[in-house]
Each structure stands twice: as C-alpha cells, then as structure tokens.
C-alpha cells in the first residue's frame, strides 16, 4: 500500500472501468484526485502492479474523511485488499485527528453495503436519486 503517483493513472482508470458499469469517474477526475485534491489517494499493489485504490477527501472545517472512490481489480477480489484499503483510510483519518470515515453507496449494491457493514459502517442517511440511473443511495459512516 502506498500513495498514488501520476504514473498509476492508466491502471486506476482500467480498474474503475472494469468495476463499474455506471457512475464511473473519468480519467480527468482521477488525474485531479491523484495529484490535486484535498485529501490522499492510496493504491494497493501486488508484485508491483496496482490492484486496487481508495481516494479519500477531507473538508476544511469537518472532522470527517470521505471515501470518494474505492475499487479492486476483479482478478484480485476476495483477497482482503478492499478491507486493507478501508483500514488504511481509518488509519489516515486517525493520523489527521478526524473522527469518522464516510461514503455513499447505491442502495441496490447489497454486496457493497454488506461489506461496509461487516467493517463497522452504519447507515446514517438515505439519498434519494443520488446515483446515475437514477438510483437511491445511502451515506454510511464508521467512527475511527
């Protein structure tokens, strides 16, 4: 696990496109998240190849760290990589003196919601028509 570099952009975009049919972020958005956003972007590697990522954003006057994007390459799923990315996010939040880690997830993505619940997240609010489709979402948080 390490901080993302601009050279990771192609692989991050590839993982994004393999992971999501809708609500995808663009190459331009990822270039910004890796190099200019207020927060941090981590990648997970296996044998020198990027296999997953998490983009974490901070807000100037909030005690919250937001998971803006997280994904693992389909060939590397079910190996605990996503859990380790979440743990790195929690660790980073604690290092920054933040109190919560949050994210938004589609209500119809039951496997993702279960995964987050297994990792301590709870639903804190519903977000009607939040995602492309339109699809409802929810905000989930965990204390760090």
Image (cartoon, rainbow, N blue to C red):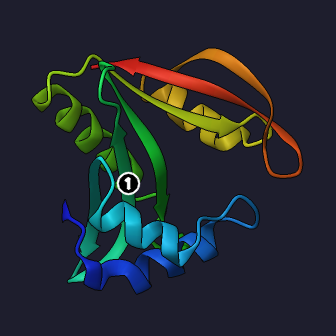
Q: Is residue 139 above or below residue 2?
A: above
Question: At which x and y percent is residue 92?
Answer: 19, 38
Q: Is residue 58 above or below residue 55?
A: above
Picture residue at 20% right of the left edge, 83% below the top: 48
**Split into 4 quadrants, where in the image is the N terminus?**
bottom left
How many badges with numbers are in the image?
1
Q: Is residue 87 left or right of residue 103?
A: left
Question: At which x and y percent is residue 116?
Answer: 51, 33
Picture residue at 38% right of the left edge, 53% below the top: 55
Picture residue at 38% right of the left edge, 54% below the top: 54
Q: Is residue 133 left or right of residue 62?
A: right
Q: Is residue 75 left or right of residue 95?
A: right
Q: Residue furthest left?
A: 95
Answer few, some or many: residues within 10 Å of disc 1's Cα (few below 14, many 20 plus, some between 14 and 19).
many
Which corner quadrant of the image does residue 64 belong to?
Answer: top left
Residue on which disc 1 sits: 54
Which corner quadrant of the image does residue 10 belong to?
Answer: bottom left
């Amino acid at each position: 696990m390490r901080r993302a570099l601009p050279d990771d952009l192609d692989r991050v975009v590839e993982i994004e496109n393999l992971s999501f049919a809708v609500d995808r972020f663009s190459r331009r958005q990822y270039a910004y998240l890796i190099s200019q956003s207020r927060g941090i972007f981590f990648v997970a590697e296996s044998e020198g190849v990027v296999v997953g990522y998490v983009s974490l954003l901070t807000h100037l006057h909030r005690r919250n760290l937001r998971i803006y994007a997280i994904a693992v390459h389909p060939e590397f799923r079910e190996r605990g990589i996503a859990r380790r990315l979440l743990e790195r996010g929690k660790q980073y939040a604690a290092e920054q003196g933040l109190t919560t880690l949050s994210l938004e997830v589609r209500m119809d993505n039951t496997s993702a919601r279960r995964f987050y619940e297994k990792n301590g997240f709870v639903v804190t609010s519903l977000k009607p028509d939040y995602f492309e489709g339109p699809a409802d979402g929810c905000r989930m948080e965990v204390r760090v």
